[in-house]
Amino acid sequence: MNPSNDELRWAYLDGELSPSEAADFDRTLSPEDRERLAAEIYLETAMASVLSESAVCPRKFWKTACVKTRKGGETARKTKTAAHRVLRLRWWLLSACGSLAAIAAGMTFFLLDAHPKSNFLVLHEQRPDELAACAQVTDGLSAVRGFVEAAALDVTFDPLNSLETAESPYRLLGAREDNFRGEPIVQLLFECSGTPAKVVLVPKAGMAAREVGRAVGVGHLSACRQIGNALVTVIGPNAARDLVRLVDERAATVAQTDTAPVFEEPPVEPAQQFVNTVQQEESPQTESDTAVNPPSPEVYEQSPQPEEATAVGTV
Amino acid sequence: MDEFLANVEKYRDQLYRFALRNVWDSSMVDDVFASSVAAAYENRHKFTPGTNFRAWLFKIFVNKCFVANRETKRSPVSLDSVASDWAAVEDAPGYGDILNDPSDFLEQCGDEVYRAFRRLSSSQRACILLKDVEHFSYKEIAEILGIPMATVMTHLSRGRALLRKELLEYAQGMGFVRCIPKALRRLEVFSNRRAKEAK
């Protein structure tokens, strides 16, 4: 909107025009106009002085204003304090609720969803060599057997059929012992047709057994079997589920061993032992002799030959 | 709080004068003044340091005065319908006498100046007070009132013209200046016609 002539004139008189605008406007003024405008300024100034005179703020007005302002400030402060109190209470409630939620989440995670922590039920290794790399015992079948018997589980690892024949799909890689919440866990590591598999032995009553039970419920395990005071679980491909049969109860094994004539052989007298040694040196053992008089278990385990014999043993 | 009140106190006379001249109901000036100071304190966080504190205070006072005038529900004599053309006023007989000695003329008018001023609209009064009495620039007035600068110019121009016309009529009526009723009547007829044309 273009300012009217009056507005321009007032802007000129008030000194609100820019220098160029003022110069342009000034050029249009006649000497009479200039005189008149000067008189207008004089009138305006006189009117302003009339409007501004005798207007001193009374002291009581200022006091009233100060009192009102202070009251308002106190009221605002009180309101603020009350609001802070409510907020603080809310913070307490919120923090308490947050703590409870965190505890509940932790408990839920601990009790219900602990599968990710149950590493012994997960087969992380993709290849058999990776699985073999994490074995604590890799010295063959006898060493693994001793390792299993040394554990606090009443089971024995006694594969009756061979693991290293051409027909056997399994190959023993080693064994390792783990700990799950204070409970010993023995893991027997196998290769099953080129894929890793493991047999996990856990105490029958305990947290690890509960984990195994949950894993069975979910369907993560290939096979599971209770033997004595232990729970035997196979983790790996379905083809590896027969591995669960390689573990047997120790007491039964001992009983079976007791009935075997080889373990009932009376202790050999030193003199007789010497005679036997001489006889053995003179006449080497044949296969039939071995079948009739098999070597004692101690010898069977210590010499490298018997291990091979075990490997080729029959059911 | 004391520091803030000390800062406000520097301008208390100016603020009081503005409220006194702007509020229609004189009995409300005390309330308007006190509530404006309290409002300024409550909204002190909205003030940007480094800017014009005085203009900021006046903005609060202007708003409070407008609110008070709205509550009074007293409409001023509608002078907008009357001609507010400066040219019409300055051509009126006797106006030259006023311009010859403005101080003497205003002295003779006495309180009529205030009364005439009160008949202006709130915006016109606010603009004239802020410009002539408080010496704010057009831009500052526009910011204080929250209106465009062109509107400020219009309010100033019309308000000043109307104020002159009121005082001229009073002076003519009182015989301070030469009175030519016919000429004045012609001026009013002319002004009314122009107002109708403008509508």
Image: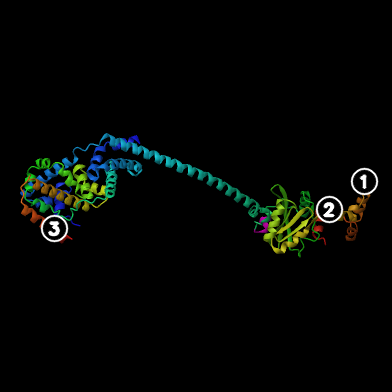
Give the side of residue B55 with respect to residue A181, left or right.
left
Q: Nearer the viewer, residue A185 or A36?
A: A36
What element does badge 2 sit on?
A: helix
Residue B16 picture location, percent across and down: 25, 40
- Residue A269 shows in this picture: yes
Q: Chain of mark 2?
A: A
Q: Nearer the viewer, residue A94 or A205?
A: A94
Q: Which residue is mark 3?
A: B192
Looking at the rendered image, the disc whose residue lies closer to the viewer, 3 or 2, is 3
Looking at the rendered image, the disc whose residue lies closer to the viewer, 1 or 2, is 2
Query: What whole-number distance in Å separates the C-alpha atoms at marks 3 and 2?
Result: 127 Å
Count residues near mark 1 (Cα–Cα under 10 Å), then give few for <14, some for 14-19, many for 20+. few
Quadrant, the N terminus of chain A: bottom left
Residue A291 picture location, percent across and down: 89, 59
Q: Chain of mark 3?
A: B
Q: How many marks?
A: 3
Question: What segment is highlighted magenta in the picture?
Answer: A126-131
Q: Amino acid at mark 3?
A: Asn
Q: Is residue A269 magenta?
A: no
Q: Which residue is mark 1?
A: A270
Q: Is residue A127 magenta?
A: yes
Q: Which residue is mark 2?
A: A251
What element does badge 3 sit on?
A: helix
Give the side of residue A170 with respect to residue A262, left or right.
left
